[in-house]
Image (cartoon, rainbow, N blue to C red):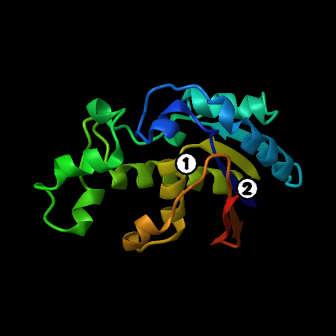
Amino acid sequence: MKIYLVRHGFTQSNRARTESFEDSKLNKSGFNVLFNTRRNLEKYNIDKVYTSELKDATQTADMLGYHDYTIDPRLNELDFGEYSGQLLEEINEHYEGVLKNEDDIFNVKYPGNESRNDIIKRVGEFLDELVERDENALCISHSLTIKSALFWILKNKSDWDSFWIENGSVTIFDIKDGKKLIKGVNIV
């Protein structure tokens, strides 16, 4: 089975480089990327489509030609709560005095009451259910959600900053005989 993870199209929050859990619409400048994404997805056998409940993901599904999708909140972006709309660097600066070591960044609960470990866990539970269903699934989601999905396979979180997920890109997992393989990241 294969899992295809697509980051939503370019949004105003992306343009401003801010983290956001709030509903934001797609920006017109990202439509060309989604046109390429749509062409890339045509070569894959997809049984079922899932999206986060946020507008940028559902709009992306519609633009990609998938109108029959299932919304699952486990595909939502990390909830930054009151820090939503701020640069990630600004959010992390707020926590600098609190962090004792590098691992702490995964345990910090943002005001939305969610940590990086929490999002890795929730995304992992969703992916485990997909494996049980044994279906080729397309999941339209968000940068930190897809990044967290990578760590469903990878275990060394020190590699967290080694990945950037592009808008409209496809990340592919191949699962065979209980083995999880990352086939591609940031395919555009």
Residue 96 picture location, percent across and down: 16, 55
Q: Nearer the viewer, residue 44 or 168?
A: 168
Which disc is residue 115 wearing?
none
Marks 2 and 1, the one that precedes in the sequence: 1
User: Which residue was labeled with disc 1?
Assistant: 126
Amino acid bearing label 1: Phe
**Left or right placement of residue 183 versus residue 166 in this view:** right
Residue 113 picture location, percent across and down: 27, 38
The C terminus: image quadrant: bottom right
Q: Is residue 46 visible?
A: no
Tag in front: 2 or 1: 2
User: In the displayed image of the protein, which residue is found farthest to the right?
Assistant: 43
Residue 30 picture location, percent across and down: 67, 38
Q: Nearer the viewer, residue 62 or 31?
A: 31
Amino acid bearing label 2: Val
User: Which residue was labeled with disc 2?
Assistant: 188
The N terminus: image quadrant: bottom right
Point 43% across, 55% down: residue: 120
Q: Nearer the viewer, residue 53 or 29?
A: 29
Tell me the quarter of the picture where residue 32 sits.
top right
- SS under mark 2: loop
**Left or right placement of residue 89 versus residue 26 in this view:** left
Q: Nearer the viewer, residue 74 or 61?
A: 61
Point 55% across, 53% down: residue: 146
Around disc 2, counting alpha carbons within 10 Å, would you say few (fewer than 14), some (14 to 19), or many (20 or more)? some
Q: Is residue 36 visible?
A: yes
User: In the displayed image of the protein, which residue is found farthest to the left?
Assistant: 97
Circle 2/circle 1 CB separation < 8 Å? no
Task: Give the answer, above or below, for where 117 lies relative to 20.
Answer: below
- SS under mark 1: helix
